[in-house]
Image (tube, rainbow, N blue to C red):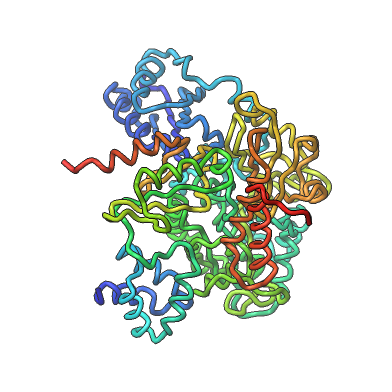
Amino acid sequence: MQDKVNEVIVRYRKEEGSIISLLQDIQEEFGYLPQEAVSYASERLDIPLSKFFGVATFYAQFYLKPRGKNIVTACCGTACHVKGSERIISRLFRELEIPAGEDTTKDMTFTLERVNCVGACSIAPVVIINKEVHGKMTPDGVVKEINKLKEPEA
Amino acid sequence: MSDRNIEIKVCMGTGGIAAGGKAVLSVFEDELRNAGIAASVEQHCSVHKVGCRGFCARDVLVDVFVDGKKTTYEYIKPDMVKKIVEEHLTQGNIVQDWVVKDDYHTFHEKQMKVVLADCGEIDPESIDAYIGRHGYEAMKKVLTSMSPGQVIDVMKASGLRGRGGAGFPAGLKWEFARKNPSDIKYLICNADEGDPGAFMDRSVIEGNPHCVIEGMVIAAYAIGANGGYVYIRAEYPLAVDRLRLALKDARERGFLGDNIQGSGFSFDVKVKLGAGAFVCGEETALIASIEGKRGMPRAKPPFPAQKGLWGKPTVINNVETLANIPSIIRKGSDWFSSLGTEKSKGTKVFALTGKIKNTGLIEVPMGISLREIIYDIGGGIEGGRNLKAVQTGGPSGGCIPANMVDIPVDYESLARVGSIVGSGGMVVMDDSNCMVNISKYFLQFTQAESCGKCIPCRIGTKRLLEILIRITEGKGRSG
C-alpha cells in the first residue's frame, strides 16, 4: 500500500493545493480511501490528518468505506426526478436487498449510489452501471441490466 | 464511382454514446470497407464522430453526406447500418423510413446557433477540424493586432453577460481584473455545472472544446493572466477526456504555453476535477476547492478580481461565456449586440428536458418567448398532457407557471417573475407533477448540498424541508 501512495505523492508534491487531486488518485487506486493510506500520506506530507478528513467528508465523491464490485449510480437530477427516478431507486434497493441505511450489498457485489445530475437529462431517467450510461430507464429495465451482472461468469 | 465524396457524422456526445453511437460508428467503418466503398473513394470517404447536436432524444443521429448532399437519420442502431450502406451509399436510394421527420426541422427552425454553431458538425477530437472552421483566428487577431484594452472595449460594447447564472457583464469583470496590478493573475473556466437538469457546458466541451480554450486565451490576454484552470465536474468523464486532449493538441500547435504564436504572451491551462459539491459552482467556493480546501464560499468583497486564487486577481468565466468570445472577436461587437434584447444580448443555450416531446440542447436568441421554446422547438408536452410549470435556473431558480408562458426569456423578464435564467436548465413539468413534491425535491437538494457555513442556509433549508414534509404527510399546520 505504501508504495502506491508514494507514487501518488510524488506526482503532486510540487503542486500547491493538491489535496483533492491526491485523494482522488488514492481513491482511484484503492476504490475508496483506506484510513491507512490517508494516514500515511498525512505523515509523509506533514499535513494534519484532520485536513484530509475535512476535505474527504466535504465532497460527495470520496468514500471512506470499501465499495462493491459493481457500481450502480442512479441520477437524481431534476429531469430524472420528474420522470420517476425515485421509483427506479426504490426498486433497486429492494432488488439488490441492500440493508437500510447502507449503500452496498452484504456480499460486496453491488454499490448503489445517488448522484445529483450527470447532465444526460435529455435521456432521463438515467442510470449509470459501471461507467456505462443507460438512458430512458424503467424499473424493469434496470433490473434486467442488473441481472446480467448477477449471472456467474463463464 | 471513384469521384464520389462521402462523409458520415455520428453523434457521440454522452447521449449519443449511451444510445450506442460507438458501435454505430465502427459498424459504418466495417460496412463501408466490406462494400468496397471505402477503397473506391479513398480519401473522399470519412466517417467521424461529432459532439452533441442537441436532439439527444433521437439518438443515435447520423448525418450522411453524399457529394455534399445531407441526409439525417434518426434512432440508428448498429444493425441498421448495413441497410443504409447498401441502399443509400451503394444504390443511391435514401432509406426514407429512417430519415428524420418534420419535427426534427421544427426543432431547429427557431434556434440560432452561435456557441453551438460547430457542435455536432466537427470532430471534437480534431484540432484541424476546428481550425478548418476559422478556429484560433480570433486568438491570432487579438495577439497580433489588438491591445488588451481594445479587447476589453470590444467585450464591453458587445454587451455579453456572464452565462453562468448571475449575468454580470463579462467585459466589466475583465476590466476590474485588468486594473488590479499583480505579477500573477489567474483565469478560471467554471465548468462545474452543478445545477441538476443542466448540461450546456458538458455539451459544449464535448462538442467543441477548442472554442472554449480559444476563448480562454483571449480572456487571459485581456486581463493579463498567466495561469489558467478549468474546474470541471468529475461526473463528466467524456468532457474531461476531450478537454485534456484538446489542451494537449493546442499546446503542441503553440496556441498555449510560452510566447504564444511569437506574441510574447504566455499562458497555459490546467484541469482541476471537481469532487462533487454543488456549492463549488460559486466563485469563492470554487477557488477554495482549487486551493485544495473544503469548498466553502466566503463573503465578498474582496471580489475574486481583487483577491482570488491564492490571493491573486482572478477572473472566473463560465464555459458558455468563454465559448462566445471567439465569434465576438471575429464578427465584431456590433454583430453580437444586434442579437437578443436591449439588455440581454446574444443567444443562450438551454437544456430542455422533462415532460416535453423534444428533449435536448437548444440555443435561442435572448428574448424568445417561453411559449416558442416549449411548443415550437420542444414540440409541446409529452403524451398530450397540459403544461404546469417550467423550472429554470436550477435549485436557486424558480418555477414559472403555465399562465406566464408568453414571457420573453431574458435576464430581466425571468427575474421579474421570480426566477432566473441561471445557467440554462429548463425542466418542463406537466399536470401530473406535484409542485409540493418538486419543492420538497429542491429543498432536499439544497439542504444536502448546504456547505454548513451560514445559518440561514444550514438551518433554514432544514426547517423549510420539515414544514414541507409535514404538509405532504397531511400534518400541515397553519402559520
On the image, the x and y values in percent for residue A87 come to: 49, 41
Which residue is rendered at x = 37% and y = 54% of the image?
A99
On the image, the x and y values in percent for residue B255 come to: 51, 59
Q: Is residue A126 left or right of residue B398?
A: left
Residue furthest out toward the left = A154
Q: Is residue A103 visible?
A: yes
Is B391 drawn above or below residue A102 in the view shown? above
On the image, the x and y values in percent for residue A57 come to: 47, 70
Is B74 drawn above or below residue B237 in the view shown? above
Residue furthest out toward the bottom = A46
User: How many numbered callouts?
Assistant: 0
Which residue is rendered at x = 36% and y = 18% of the image?
B83
Q: Tell me the quadrant of the picture where the C terminus of chain B can be found.
A: bottom right
Q: As rendered, which of B210 and A99 lies closer to the eye? A: A99
Q: Tell me the quadrant of the picture where the N terminus of chain B can be found.
A: top left
Tell me the quarter of the picture where residue B77 sits.
Answer: top left
On the image, the x and y values in percent for residue B232 come to: 51, 59
Tell me the quarter of the picture where residue B309 sits.
Answer: bottom right
Q: Is residue B325 visible?
A: no
Which residue is rendered at x = 42% and y = 50% of the image?
A73
Q: Is residue B366 left or right of residue B182?
A: right
Q: As rendered, which of B142 and B399 lies closer to the eye? A: B399
Tell me the quarter of the picture where residue B82 sits.
Answer: top left
Q: Is residue B368 left or right of residue B23?
A: right
